[in-house]
Amino acid sequence: MMKHCMFGLIILSISIYGGEMENVPGTYHVNNNSDLAADNNNGSPEKPFKTISAAVKMAGPGDIVVVHKGIYRELVQPDRSGLPDKPIVFQAAEGETAIIRGSDIFSPLWQVEKTAGATVVYRGFLDDAMFVDYAMPWSKTHWYTDNPFRTKIIISQSGSKIAKPEKGISQWARPWPSRTMPVETEEAAVTFDTDNRTMVYDGPPGTLPRTLGQIFVDGEPVQQVRTPEEVEEHANTFIVAPDGKSLLLHLRDNSDPRRHLVEITTRAQIFCPAKRGIDYIHVRGFIMEHCANQGPFPQAGALSTRSGAHWKIENNVIRHATTVGIDCGGENYLLDGVSGGFARPEGNEVTGNIISDNGLCGIAVYSSKNVRISGNVLERNNRLGFTPGIDIGWWEQSAIKLHNCPGAVISDNMIRDNDCFGVWLDTYYAGARISRNLIVNNMFAGIFLECSLGPLTIDNNVVALTRSGHGVYAHDSSGMTIANNLLFRNAHVGVLMRNVTERKVSKDMVCATSGNKVLNNMILGNGQGVVAIPARNERDKDNISDYNISSGGTHLYDNGPELFALLAREDRQLFKSGEYAALVNAGKAFEVRWKDEKALFVGVDAWRSLTGWDSHSLEPFTLKDSYMTFRSRLLNWELDVPKTAVEFRAIPVPDVTLDYFGKTVDYQKGAAAGPFQHLKAGRNVFYLWPR
């Protein structure tokens, strides 16, 4: 496992230049703390550049840009590619902290706006000159205002970001919005999705939309609220005044902002190529924080590859973007939806980074082949708590969100405490793999799969304590092998698959839930059930669930009844007749309406009788086996394991050869179910991170 630390500095060549420097392969130094730094220097250690952007102009294939300690307030825009054996490398100096920020110091003439009892609210006026560098990378095709504090957050289709005043489409965040019909002016308050005309919500009636702008006081974020009254009532809050010209700020202890470092986001991104298709770039060891990027689609991360290929993004800290932390794909699903044409990136690697506290997503990727995301820590993403139907139009919130990424590998990451999905693979994941990740205490499903024929392998992951969702959730998805995972005490079902839409994966083939395998897993203590799969029909067939170790999970202190579920969406009367109805009448099954379909919950014996599934599976825990706990802060799992579970033998699964800890899964000698191959009878404690 790669440690989260700065990469050591590799000096390829250091030259002392005299006179005008030639652009030869070498090492360029940037040091804005040096009294000798200047952008017309030659970039040597003795005459470093003052800005990273100056080094960008000089660096070519094989060159290294070394950035020394300091805070760099700029947008870094590489404008040329490296080569396969000569990448252009940007890296922090060994042992030094190089911070790149998309924010600037905000020091207006603060005025006391209002005092109410012990509360003091300050007003600071926004100077448009602070935002001269604010721009989105796709500005030629998509419209936005030139000030993030006057631009509302729009997380929806790219068409919603194209100026169409005649349709009432605008990103302007003022005046107070109407929740009725679109207005006819450019300052329209309501944005509509251009494909289906559904509203992209700005928030509850009588509230201002949230803007892209962020404020940080002494390095800590200040919460943006929706009304001036909320600023008065709650400390550490701000709002943009209704006229968009000033900020209202209420600090803890009614503190005077002039006594603090106040920073506001003035740039949309932090590291983003000047044009699309820049390849072979390495970025190592930086802290990148504070930017005001607009939501997908298109995608525009704080750190963006802009459709480039063969990037390596290693050992950085990426945090506090308004929406997406890193995007390393093709930006948009429309071929002409972004400036500069269409590119299909491939081979990008995101390894060893800490990606935290971003407003919407940690990592977003669209249409990229063979992307590898490994060894990262992703925490507290969707920090701004975007909620579809409340203040955004689309479901895009996830620690890792991939669209159309065949061959993707997501492995060895820790994904915890995110207020969103853990890993989400959406639309065409052929040949992808999700393996050996620790996914714990996330808001929605730990792993979410959507709309593909597969194949896909999900193996040796630990998915635990999902707060409001399933361990593994899939809709309209086929060809999945879910093997050797631990799915523990997730709020809903351990593994749930269903149909939701009639989308087609080819001209004649509608998405289905077929050919999926649930094998060799430990599915324990999940709140609503072990496994849920659609009942067999022409669309949903050839699914298998077997060789699993399972238990019930309706209560924290005992395992409760062990339940499984069959789902019926196409034929919602399916459970009203035949053997299904007989089980209901005998009290061995119960039917519930779940969303727009019916679910029939049954015990393990009825499940085996109805489906033939899990005939080899084991239920070794009794209702009173309570010694089973997961410590989400310490990241260890402890339980008493019965001898029968230790002796239980898993079925061979192709390519699943290493467990969670990297130990060999030896099926010939007798492999264990679940992600741990060193189970023992009695007390077991598994320390899950770091490995």
Image (cartoon, helix red, strand yellow):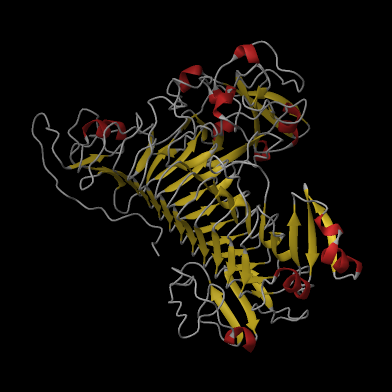
Q: Quadrant of residue 646?
A: bottom right
Residue 393: x and y in percent read 65, 33
Examine the rendered structure and indicate whether residue 494 appears above or below residue 131: below
Examine the rendered structure and indicate whether residue 33 appears above or below residue 689: above
For image coordinates 62% across by 63% down, the residue present is: 543
Foreground: 368 or 687? Answer: 368
Residue projecting furthest to the left: 18
Q: Quick check: 555 left or right of 458?
A: right
Residue 361: x and y in percent read 54, 44
For image coordinates 58% across by 30% down, the residue present is: 157
Does the rendering let one see residue 527? no
- Give the tally of numbered discs: 0
Residue 293: x and y in percent read 51, 32
Q: Quadrant of residue 102?
A: top left
Instruction: Tell me the quarter of the image containing the N terminus.
Output: bottom left
Residue 214: x and y in percent read 56, 33
Does the rendering let one see residue 87? yes
Residue projecting furthest to the right: 585
Foreground: 109 or 626? Answer: 626
Examine the rendered structure and indicate whether residue 28 appears above or below residue 210: below
Instruction: Tell me the quarter of the image containing the C terminus.
Output: bottom left
